[in-house]
């Protein structure tokens, strides 16, 4: 072994380590390595001497007595001060502002929502069944009135409600109600003039409260008002969800497109069947005749596909798309027939439906719609 | 009182047991940290933090792995390393000169020692001054024992070279 090979063993010797025999023999005979060993020893001794000088500096005496920690009550803790880093304090302030502004936003949205729509429920003495309509609660909006007409064999009930003023969860409503005995079959045009001669009764309604109005010849009609913080899918059925029930067939605001052309725009009304297995849409357009869209196959009908609020079908060499504003049915297929010669004036019993010059749609059972005289 | 008994006493918050630990390791840890940090005040602070942490949370020592003394030095080394990380580059402390009576040879070795990198300086200090074994050094520094031996050799060699260079300059002047 040479000096370079035993260098590390010289260092190890200084640490009290045993080294290989050949390394020990080389160190024993090599003056250079012995000198190195001596110098390492000198270094160690010098370092210990320096440390001894340093130890002359007294080490701080510290008491390590076991302290009995007295539990401070919450009041004392609350009054005590604490240190908090500036960054943490700044983050806390930002968090407080963000959270509080979030609450304000939530409250503002809830408040704004509550002021947007008013659900009115009327209970008529004739049937006891509720009639519901929803209207915008903001008195400044155009769509602020709710017309309600009940055709019964016993008579005709007319109700018009408008929002006079609105503040928070209180509304000042103006109601006009009239009962015409023996006029159940009377055709009614939904115009403001219809209610013009009926005196208006003013009610101050709070959300959830119920009041009654007396209607001559009919009795007490119970009115209940509720604020809604959302736009209901159907204005006459506020609790309705967007997805149809298994037995429902719902047509809301239908538009029929042939190739790239709108052929019938049914307007913003709605017509719903909640249980008829052969529920069928009759959609009429001036110059187009009528389209029957049924849940069941029938003579002369072609199959169409349903996807959410859309029905597609091909008929007479054209591609049709029927659009509605909400999902139609849970079924995947419907059957469609086009009757271009259909005229409401020839088939519809009710005069308001028997007009050939305007679009019209309704959902009834297929058997009823195939009758020669359609009464509904 | 062996390490295990001492540690059990500390875990029971026995002040006398902790005082015994402080008296046996306090000065050595302070000297080691002084070398590691190059600043007496910082060394005292870190030593104080180390003992305070052991007193408040006595849960890191395993007698199977090493001695209580090496555990304390290892804890001190980690805290000193954290102290270094917290320091800004411009606040780097220079090693304070050690006061005392110095012959030429002795002062040259002392000066050469101060010029060593901090890792070599602390390793040599722990070995030569504190008398830590290879096993203890391996635990304190968290390196294998074989590495301890090679690093000690490298540190001694480096110190010797600096010392020789300084001596040649001294003799030449």
Image (cartoon, coloured by chain):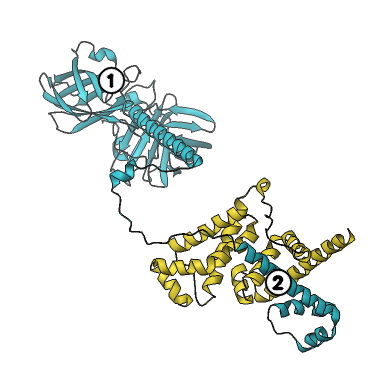
Residue A262 x/y as whole percent:
49, 28
Dot 2 corresponds to which residue? Answer: A44
The image quadrant of residue A39 is: bottom right
**Residue in the image at 33% along x and 42% along y:** A78
Residue A85 x/y as whole percent:
49, 42
What is the secondary structure assignment of the residue under circle 1?
strand
Residue A281 x/y as whole percent:
36, 36
**Residue in the image at 19% along x and 14% along y:** A200
Task: Kindly report which numbered mark, 2 or 1, lies closer to the viewer in this rendering.
Answer: 2
Q: Earlier in the sequence, mark 2 or mark 1?
A: 2
Residue A105 x/y as whole percent:
40, 31
The image quadrant of residue B168 is: bottom right
> What quarter of the picture does the C terminus of chain B occupy?
bottom right
**Residue in the image at 20% along x and 20% along y:** A204
Chain letter for cyan?
A
State the CA–CA distance, disc 2 to disc 1.
94 Å
**Residue in the image at 33% along x and 58% along y:** A68
> What quarter of the picture does the N terminus of chain B occupy?
bottom left
Q: Is residue B103 above or below residue A330?
A: below
Q: Is residue A131 above or below residue A38?
A: above
- Closest to the observer: A24 or B59? A24
The tag on residue A166 is 1
Q: Is residue A338 visible?
A: no
Q: Is residue A284 visible?
A: yes
Q: Chain of mark 2?
A: A
- Closest to the observer: A238 or A247? A238
Q: Chain of mark 1?
A: A
Chain letter for yellow?
B
């Amino acid at each position: 072994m040479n000096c370079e090979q035993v260098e590390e063993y010289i260092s190890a010797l200084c640490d009290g380590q045993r080294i290989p025999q050949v390394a020990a023999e080389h160190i024993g005979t090599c003056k250079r390595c012995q000198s190195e060993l001596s110098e390492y020893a000198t270094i160690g001794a010098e370092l210990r001497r320096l440390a001894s000088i340093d130890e002359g500096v007294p080490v701080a005496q510290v008491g390590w007595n076991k302290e009995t920690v007295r539990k401070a009550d919450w009041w004392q803790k609350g009054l005590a001060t604490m240190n908090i880093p500036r960054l943490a304090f700044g983050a806390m302030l930002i968090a407080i502002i963000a959270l509080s502004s979030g609450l304000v936003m939530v409250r503002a949205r809830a408040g704004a929502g509550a002021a947007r729509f008013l659900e009115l429920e009327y209970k008529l003495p004739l049937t006891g069944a509720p009639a519901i309509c929803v209207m915008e609660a903001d008195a400044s909006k155009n769509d602020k009135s709710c017309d309600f007409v009940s055709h019964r064999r016993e008579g005709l009930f007319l109700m018009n409600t408008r929002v006079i003023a609105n503040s928070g969860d209180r509304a000042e409503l103006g109601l006009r109600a009239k009962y015409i005995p023996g006029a159940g079959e009377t055709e009614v045009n939904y115009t403001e003039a219809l209610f013009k001669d009926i005196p208006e009764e003013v009610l101050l309604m709070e959300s959830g409260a119920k009041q009654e109005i007396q209607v001559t010849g009919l009795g007490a009609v119970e009115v209940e008002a509720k604020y809604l913080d959302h736009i209901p899918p159907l204005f006459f059925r506020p609790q309705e969800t967007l997805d149809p029930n298994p037995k429902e067939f719902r047509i809301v605001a239908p538009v029929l497109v042939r190739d790239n052309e709108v052929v019938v725009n049914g307007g913003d009304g709605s017509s719903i069947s909640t249980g008829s297995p052969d529920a069928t849409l009759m959609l009429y357009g001036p110059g187009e005749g009528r389209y029957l869209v049924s849940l069941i196959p029938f003579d002369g009908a072609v199959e169409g596909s349903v996807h959410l609020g859309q029905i597609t079908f091909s008929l007479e060499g054209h591609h049709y798309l029927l659009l509605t504003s909400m999902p139609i049915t849970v079924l995947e297929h419907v059957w469609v027939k086009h009757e271009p010669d259909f005229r409401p004036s020839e088939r519809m019993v009710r005069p308001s439906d028997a007009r050939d010059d305007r679009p019209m749609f309704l959902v009834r059972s297929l058997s009823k719609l195939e009758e020669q005289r359609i009464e509904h | 009182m062996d390490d295990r008994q001492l540690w059990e006493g500390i875990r029971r918050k026995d002040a006398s047991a902790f005082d015994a630990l402080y008296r046996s390791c306090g000065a050595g840890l302070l000297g080691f940290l002084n070398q590691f940090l190059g600043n007496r005040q910082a060394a005292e602070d870190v030593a104080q933090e180390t003992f305070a942490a052991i007193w408040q949370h006595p849960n890191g020592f395993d007698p199977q792995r090493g001695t209580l003394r090496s555990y304390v030095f290892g804890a001190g080394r980690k805290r000193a390393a954290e102290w270094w990380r917290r320091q800004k580059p411009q606040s780097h402390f220079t090693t304070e000169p050690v006061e005392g009576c110095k012959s030429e040879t002795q002062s040259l070795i002392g000066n050469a020692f101060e010029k060593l990198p901090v890792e070599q300086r602390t390793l040599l200090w722990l070995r030569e001054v504190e008398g830590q074994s290879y096993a203890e050094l391996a635990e304190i520094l968290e390196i294998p024992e074989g590495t301890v031996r090679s690093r000690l050799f490298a540190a001694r060699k480096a110190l010797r070279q600096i010392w020789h260079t300084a001596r040649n300059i001294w003799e030449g002047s």
